[in-house]
Image: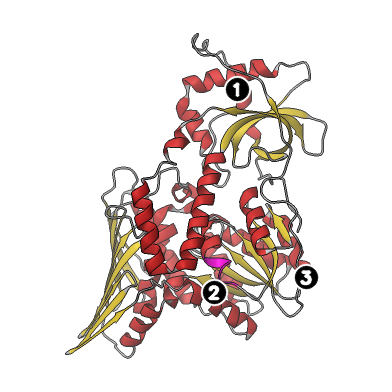
Amino acid sequence: MRIIDDNVPWPEGVIVDVEKIYTVPFSEINSSLNYKFREVISKILFYLIHEGINLTRYKIIAYKLQRKILAERKVIFAYGKIKDTNNYVIALGPQDCPHARYLAFNKKLAVSINESDSLSNKLELLLNYFEQNQNILRELFYYSPYSGKELDIILSQILKDKVEEPSKVMRRDLTLTKSERRGIGVSGGRTTKANGKKRNLFLAGAGSYALSYILPTVKKVNYHTVIDLNLTLANLAAEKYKFQFADTSTERALQRLRDCKNPILIIATYHSTHLPIVEQAIQSNPNTKIFVEKPPVTTEEHLKKLISYRENPAHFIEIGYNRRYSPLIIGAKKALDGKKSPITMTCIIKELNIPLSHWYYWPSQGTRVVGNLSHWLDLGVFFIQKRPVSINVISASSKFAADEVSLAVKFEDNSLLTLIASDRGNKIRGVQEYLDIRCEDLTIMIDDFLTMKVLDGGQKKVIRNIIRDKGHSQMYRSFISRVEHEQKPAYPNNDLAISTRLYLSIKDLLLSGEKSINLGELVEK
């Protein structure tokens, strides 16, 4: 296994071969790492009972890793050469792995420097600036080039501007420490011999979801390449599952698809990057079997391109809405078979409590409507199978327009899908959901995937599960099985068009402050 110890520049970025660093003090992150011990124990006990030992263990590992990464994230002031040049710069920016040899910085935050320039004087100016502008330091700490936000800060301007004298009582050690110049994570991993009969797995995105649900489920493959922007995550997944390559660049990593006869690619990255990664994979090897986690895209333009690629019989692109594969959802679908009357479906969802700094809130990611409510919008499309004609929405959130949402979607046959999503309420179970589906004399109630009651005429049937099964394992097994048996993807393009345009329309409504919209020919848009 080859450990990658460098980051990858984005269009507005630059890579620095770091020689010296200084960590800019920022204490806010410490408060987000404090958790009530009793709450954590209660949560673990619930997950052990209702999601099993293995999944609970994977979630605990992923949870601890995410906390470790968050704790290690720093805003740093760096000195070094632009990679593969002799040009020295000073640079400023947030880093998840601050001690990696190569670090990526926004070009606005990198300035050329002469050997005679004083680093300590420039650092003093910078720290004084942040002392007076803590809000800008906070913005910088949470910045990502994938957020869709513009950086208002320009390093060269800060160093030129006159800044008030720092507090006289403040004493700073302005010594820049020598960079440890090392890769982050594991070292010395062993390469496993590839089995020619197995598919070569490429995994884009090694975050908590991938560590909890994807890698423990997708087996009997050659673990070829794992890709993540975070060096720690890429190296950790590579070591644990014996991937041949760990990488931080999808473009660089997916070039290896050209040499693979039977590759599969699972995409679980930032939502806005799904379509670009699909395109990179197809360009490298059109025979790649691709799985795209939900939500598949975040824009209408990306949706049209994705549908076009899926319509090409030479391409295999599966879409990952796991709840369609849950045994209780499959049972409910069978109970509705043969009924022609309108359906009334109500979903009440307890969402996770997440801070406004979470990447779901980035403009590029489309809010929590796109990132999370897309699950239940897709379920409504799955059950109703009609064209939506209108949407009504309301938000009760004072912090963000697309939170605390209640919405109703009317379909052409007078079916009605109602969603109520809130992060208020008990949080021990994580995401909780209650589904109520009604048609003619049939009522189906699914409570958090633990019980399902079916009232059909005068008959009552109750199914009780110990394990809360939301369909993740079945979804990935179905994907691998369809690939092996040379079958087409299971997810229909018509459902892709409807469910995606639903969540994009709802997101736009909420952000604009509008309350309703008539959709017209949504599918033919």
Q: Position of residue 299 (x, y in %)?
A: 50, 58
Label 1, residues with CA under 10 Å away: few <14, some 14-19, many ≥20: few
Residue 193, label in figure = 3
Q: Position of residue 194 (x, y in %)?
A: 76, 72
Specify the quadrant of the image occupied by residue 438.
Answer: bottom left
Of label 3 and label 1, which has the lower sequence position? 1
Q: Which residue is mark 1?
A: 157
Specify the quadrant of the image occupied by residue 78.
Answer: top right
Give amino acid for label 3.
Answer: Lys
Q: Residue at x 38, y 52 (%)?
A: 40
Q: Is the residue 505 above or below the residue 39 in the image?
A: below
Q: Position of residue 164 (x, y in %)?
A: 51, 11
Label 3, residues with CA under 10 Å away: few <14, some 14-19, many ≥20: few
How far, Cα to Cα, is label 3 from label 1? 53 Å
Q: Residue furthest left?
A: 458
Quadrant of the snapshot with the C terminus? bottom left
> Comparing marks 2 and 1, which lies closer to the viewer?
2
The stretch in magenta equals 213-218
Q: Which residue is mark 2?
A: 476
Dot 3: element: loop
Camera-side residue: 77 or 107?
77
Give amino acid for label 2.
Answer: Tyr
How far, Cα to Cα, is label 2 from label 1? 50 Å
Give amino acid for label 1.
Answer: Gln
Q: Is residue 287 left or right of residue 269?
A: right
